Amino acid sequence: MVGSKTKEKLTSDSPRAFINRELSWLRFARRVLEMAKDAEVPLLERMKFAGILGMLHDEFFMKRVSGLKRQVNKGVNKLSLDGRTPTEELAACRKEVLKQNRELSRLLSFELRPALASHGIGIVDLKDLSDHHRADLTEYFKRSVLPILTPLAVDAEHPFPFIRSLGLNLAVNVKEGKRGDRFVRVKVPTNRNRWVPLSDRSGFVPLEQVIAANLDQLFPDAEIVSYEFRVTRAARGEEGEEGDSTIHTGVLEPGSIIRQVTDELKARRFAGEVRLQVAKETPKKMRQWLTQQLKLVETDVYVTDHFMAVADLLRFDVEGHEELRYPPHAPITHNRLRNLIASDSAAIFDEISRGDILLHHPYHSFDTSVLRFLQSAATDDKVLAIKLTIYRTSSDSPIIQALAEAARRGKQVAVLVEITARFDEEPNIAWGRLLEREGVHVSYGVEKLKTHVKLAMVVREEADGVRRYVHVGTGNYHSGTARLYEDIGILSCDPDLSADVAAVFNELTSSTPYDGYRLMLVAPRMMRTRFIELIRREAAHANEGRSSGIRAKMNQLQDPEIIRELYRASQAGVPITLNVRGLCGLRPGIKNLSENIRVFCVLGRFLEHGRIYGFENGGSPEYFFGSADWMKRNLDRRVETIAPVRDPLLVAEVEEILTVAENDNHTAWDLRSDGSYVRRRPKRNEEPRPSQQVFMNIVR
């Protein structure tokens, strides 16, 4: 417990009252690692969790470690919220990452790979194969890999080559008689399957091993030895987060944002190195030479004794073996949308006009709800206009196709494409240009702010006049992730809500501030202020002896001002339950500070992504949902929207979503005041209640 080793009384302003942001991120990675360790999880799903851990580590170095290194290199000594210098944060992060890497290595080597082998689908080392298998792989190499390899030497005439971020490479030491040793870099191609199947389908071999074993085809008559290595480069952060983003800064010329983003993408490819991963067998001399060439230091080097690019396990495709996966999940159509006539484009609008519809994905089908809403709008003759925000979408997006079809039919279509959505900039620029060619009005975000709202609006001419139909959600308009991410949304034609959504779109496309919102909380204009008012209102209720409470679900909790307000509400006696999936800077359970606060998270087959905020309000509960977490970036540097849930029936459904998660005794993890998490387990003779499975069983 925090405070048990010191007499210091923690207050809402004490550094030790906060959990370090970077370490909290890594604790989420640790929970993913624990899922990979869990023998109750199907084997191939455990492999995916291992891949997710690799992806999280890659992202952590690109986003967070890079920012810390920039601060260190600039001599910045500003303390983090929990009182650490950037140097101290880097050291603590390295220690935790090394520990997780060691555990992952043991897991892969002694549990997961042997278990795969027992099912005939192991990831095997080439050196352990028979001569027959080796000969087959050599033929595969000659036929499919050798023609696309490009060895790059380093000598007096050739400088050290540029190493692309996250790519796999072989550092090849070539000895050719009197010429002496030469360093040659061979890049492992990304357009070949990383996991090469054996000819008899008895297992898979990492591609880099196939290349390493056949380098004599590239360097005949030479003595060759090779070692795997991998480089991670920085990904610049948001303005004000790591402090040196080039996007949305300075004075922008009209239409210059696409050029700025394109320049940023080019800069990212050549951004500074932040991590070097090397194989355990790499000689010290080679390791030091690579470190020097990449302008890194010893603490940037991570030695691994398992295969690198663990994130590629997410693409470990095995045919069959359904018994090694989660049981198939088929999202169901919401009960109010099940009997709609497929050919009637007006049917979904008629149903929405009967009352708001709450959608809970992936339990409710995205395709038969949100996608149908937009596809119907594209073909319905009474629809005059469609407006939509795109933050991330799928590569073969049926939504993009629907918008293009609507424009071709003469409807007014306006789309806000956020082209600074990190790692989705290029596809979003491409989607924007495609839509422009189809006649869609495309806007590319708001100057100096990232647009993160999840809104759609359809304007329809009806017998009693023009009516607006809206979808307000917590997730992206992405039909692929809608099957994997937990999100909520509401389909509505509520006049007040629709007017607010229309005002948001007008503000986004006209860049003209608007202060007349009736229901919605909009960032950065007034969302922070309103949330603080709601939290303080609960404290006032508690102080006056009225019923009070805060129940919230979000992805991240980091904003210092919000955390301090929650501490004060706890001190006033407000019971607070927070379901925070990822990083959390708040310490729960500290006497006289946060003893009334409970923090937990749920980790399962779907990524928890929905955001809900509930306030007891003296017995008249109010619930809100939308795109924003309680993060400084969401409240101050993004355009975000939070909407109220007004229909009593939908309020009950939202309360049920929160309650089911709170009662999870199998896949929920409780945050302790020291920053660690403890997984819940059913008590003796108690039935397991994994919340995601409960939702699959009860969704209506």
Image: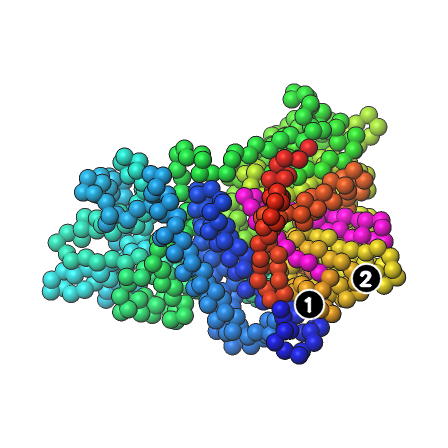
Residue 590, disc: 1
Residue interval drawn in magenta: 597-625
Q: Amino acid at mark 2?
A: Ala
Q: Nearer the viewer, residue 266 or 290?
A: 290
Mark 2, secondary structure of its residue: helix
Q: Residue furthest front?
A: 685
Mark number displayed over residue 539: 2
* Mark 1, other Cα within 10 Å: few <14 / some 14–19 / many ≥20: many
| Vertical arrangement, residue 212 with respect to residue 329, above or below | below
Answer left or right for 591 relative to 93.
Answer: right
**Residue at left offset 16%, top offset 61%:** 175
Quadrant, the N terminus: bottom right
Quadrant of the drawing holding the C terminus: top right
Determine whether 472 is above or below 173 in the image: above
* Residue at the farthest bottom position: 7
Q: How far from the left and from the top, in percent, is residue 146?
A: 25, 45
| Residues at circles 2 and 1 in contact by the CB criterion of under 8 Å | no
Q: What colouring style does the render use?
A: rainbow
Q: Nearer the viewer, residue 308 or 146?
A: 308
Q: Nearer the viewer, residue 76 or 532?
A: 532
Residue at 37% x, 43% y is 116
Asked where in the image residue 477 lies, by quadrant, the reply is top right
- Would residue 326 be found to the left or right of residue 240 on screen? left
Residue type indicated by callout 1: Ile
Q: Residue at x 52, y 66 (%)?
A: 67
Q: Earlier in the sequence, mark 2 or mark 1?
A: 2
Q: Which percent across, then down, holds residue 113?
A: 36, 47
Q: How many marks?
A: 2
* Secondary structure type for disc 1: loop
Q: Position of residue 566 (x, y in %)?
A: 73, 62
**Left-right relation of 385 to 23:** right
Q: Residue at x 25, y 40 (%)?
A: 140
